[in-house]
Image: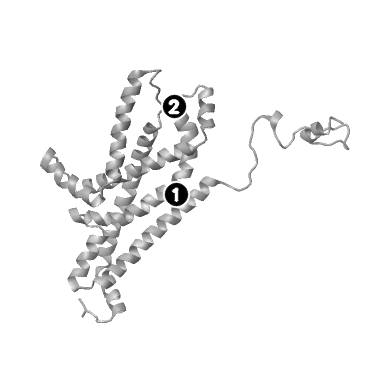
Amino acid sequence: MSTFPTEFWPRIAFLVQNYGESFLRGAGVTIVIAVLSTIAGCLIGFAVGIVQTVPTDRTENKAKWFFMGIVKFILNAYVEIFRGTPMMAQAMFIYFGAAQVFGLHMNMWQVALFVVSINTGAYMAETVRGGILSIDAGQTEGAKAIGMTHVQTMLYVILPQAFRNIIPQIGNNLIINIKDTCVLSVIGVVELFFTTKGVAGAYYTYFESFTIALVIYFIMTFTCSRILRHVEGKLDGDDNYDLATTDTLTHTSGLYKYKDNPNKMTNQNLDIREGGR
């Protein structure tokens, strides 16, 4: 290993050259935990958010009303507890508490994915609930009018519209998770922050090491935000579009022409608007 330089930029180059692989490995662990946990958290959030919006009527079915009341109370407690406590404390509590109280010995990866997932799920539950409630009530009433159940209404009418509205928050949660995985270093997860501390301690180059870490964090978050922004644009579709239909009688382009009189208007819809003259 070459002599350690004394200037700032040469030190940066030295650390990248000698510890670049370690930085990339830590960044890889960070992005894997963040992406997998965000996906799992979104699934949890969708499930909890949908259940929280299930309509209940005490006068129609008291047993269902009582059961759903208990379920909603448990889910609300889950959301409030995990939104109201720090992820670092949650990681310590689950990592050591699961082994001491329940005899369940989980490794660092399992705890990391579990903690970040349920934490994300708590935030996403409120986002999904808000997204569902933001859809006009007429959509639900129309779906019920044609005989759809609550599940069918959610799957085919409400959630497709709500999903577009909550995509920005999904992106926010992913970016937050990329940054907040650093708290998992308290249970020994060797992600980017943990790796950076080790490199910095080897030469007491905290400023230089964390400069590299900041750049890597920014590259990961910026890339993810651009990808999600592109997905948003794809879901929005084109600004201008034509109505597609297979019913020739209602086709907006007009399909019928008058062969006998070439001077007559050829668009059926225009002909109707002119009174058939």
In the rendered image, residue 125, in percent from the top left (x then y), is placed at 36, 40
Q: Quadrant of residue 184?
A: bottom left
For marks 2 and 1 on the same chain, the one whose residue lies earlier in the sequence? 2
Q: Would you say 177 lies left or right of 150 here?
A: left
**Which quadrant holds the C terminus?**
top right
Q: Mark 2 points at which residue?
A: 150
Question: How far apart in space, not on screen, are marks 2 and 1 (Cα)?
Answer: 26 Å
Question: In the drawing, what numbered circle is on residue 94?
Answer: none
Residue name at image x 54 percent, y 27 percent: 142
- Element class at badge 2: helix
Residue count near mark 2 (Cα–Cα under 10 Å), binned few <14, some 14–19, many ≥20: some
Residue name at image x 88 percent, y 33 percent: 261
Question: In the drawing, what numbered circle is on residue 168?
Answer: 1
In the rendered image, residue 93, in percent from the top left (x then y), is placed at 18, 46
Residue count near mark 1 (Cα–Cα under 10 Å), binned few <14, some 14–19, many ≥20: some
Of residues 195 and 141, the one nearer the viewer is: 141
